[in-house]
Image (cartoon, grey):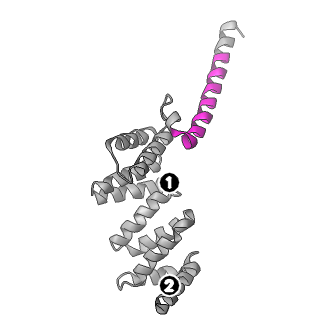
């Protein structure tokens, strides 16, 4: 092996080590300090998504031009990821473009099935638009992913069960004995007892 070829091999090994180290640092920073890894070169799409989400939360759900730019940049950097699409869906929803928001959220759900934001939004949108079977499918997934949402989801299912047009979908869902059927039934009984006592 010549000196030049050794130099090339050493350079390749060092470059590989650099990229591995950078990937590990960025992956750690994406979750813990997204503001740091978002500005690394090249910029991290996951960190940009986290920054956009932080900005939206800090502004009580408002999606300003800076958040929109972060979302667009994140979508360009990680085009197969679901989280930036879900944030873009929120932006479309805020603009009143519900068909586009639904399309973005459904794509986000397919790409990131464990991301509760898309599931929660779709649950509410499907219930609002009388797509009750689809809403109940999202309800089960959402409660498994984010158990803290159970009280709110139970309340929505209870409201659906009280509607003539939605009650058949609730009965069909309960007949399939999903994992949430027993706890929901116990919740509904407790609510009925509490209502009867007042």
Q: Is residue 77 above or below residue 160?
A: above
Residue 56 placed where, x, y %? 40, 49
Q: Is residue 36 above or below residue 182?
A: above
Taking the spot 34% from the left edge, 74% from the top edge, the residue there is: 130
Residue farthest along the bottom direction in this orientation: 196
Q: Which residue is more in the foreground, 77 or 110?
A: 77
Nearer mark to the viewer, of 1 and 2: 2
Classed neighbour count for the residue bearing mark 2: other residues with Cα under 10 Å, few (<14), some (14–19), many (≥20): some
Report if residue 177 is visible in the image. Answer: no
**Left or right, 30 with reference to 7:** left
Q: Which residue is mark 2?
A: 191
Q: Is residue 100 above or below residue 168?
A: above
To which quarter of the image does residue 103 belong?
A: bottom left
Residue 21 placed where, x, y %? 63, 30
**Left or right, 83 with reference to 13:** left
Residue 171 placed where, x, y %? 47, 84
**Left or right, 160 with reference to 192:** left
Q: Is residue 79 above or below residue 89?
A: above
All told, the count of numbered labels is: 2
Residue 4 placed where, x, y %? 65, 8
Report if residue 34 is visible in the image. Answer: yes
Residue farthest along the left direction in this orientation: 96
Q: Which residue is mark 1?
A: 112
What is the number of the mark on residue 71? none
Real-space Cα separation, disc 1 to disc 2, in angstroms: 34 Å
Quadrant including the N terminus:
top right
Residue farthest along the front direction in this orientation: 198
Segment tinted magenta in the rendering: 9-34
To which quarter of the image does residue 72 belong?
A: top left
Q: Earlier in the sequence, mark 1 or mark 2?
A: 1
Magenta part mainly helix, strand or loop? Answer: helix
Find out whether the residues at labels 1 and 2 contact each other: C-beta distance under 8 Å: no
């Amino acid at each position: 092996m010549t000196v030049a070829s050794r130099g090339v091999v050493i350079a390749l090994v060092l470059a590989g080590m650099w990229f591995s180290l950078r990937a590990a640092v960025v992956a750690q920073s994406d979750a813990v300090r997204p503001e740091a890894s978002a500005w690394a070169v090249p910029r991290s799409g996951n960190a940009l998504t986290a920054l956009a989400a932080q900005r939206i939360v800090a502004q009580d759900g408002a999606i300003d031009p800076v958040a929109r730019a972060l979302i667009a940049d994140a979508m360009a950097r990680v085009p197969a990821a679901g989280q930036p699409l879900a944030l873009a869906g929120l932006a479309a929803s805020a603009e009143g473009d519900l068909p586009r928001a639904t399309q973005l959220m459904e794509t986000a759900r397919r790409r990131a099935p464990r991301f509760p934001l898309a599931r929660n939004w779709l649950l509410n949108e499907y219930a609002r638009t009388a797509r009750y079977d689809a809403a109940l499918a999202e309800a089960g997934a959402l409660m498994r992913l984010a158990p803290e949402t159970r009280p709110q989801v139970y309340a929505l299912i209870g409201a659906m069960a009280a509607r003539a047009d939605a009650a058949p979908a609730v009965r069909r869902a309960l007949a399939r004995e999903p994992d949430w059927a027993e706890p929901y039934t116990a919740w509904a009984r407790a609510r009925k007892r509490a209502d009867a006592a007042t």
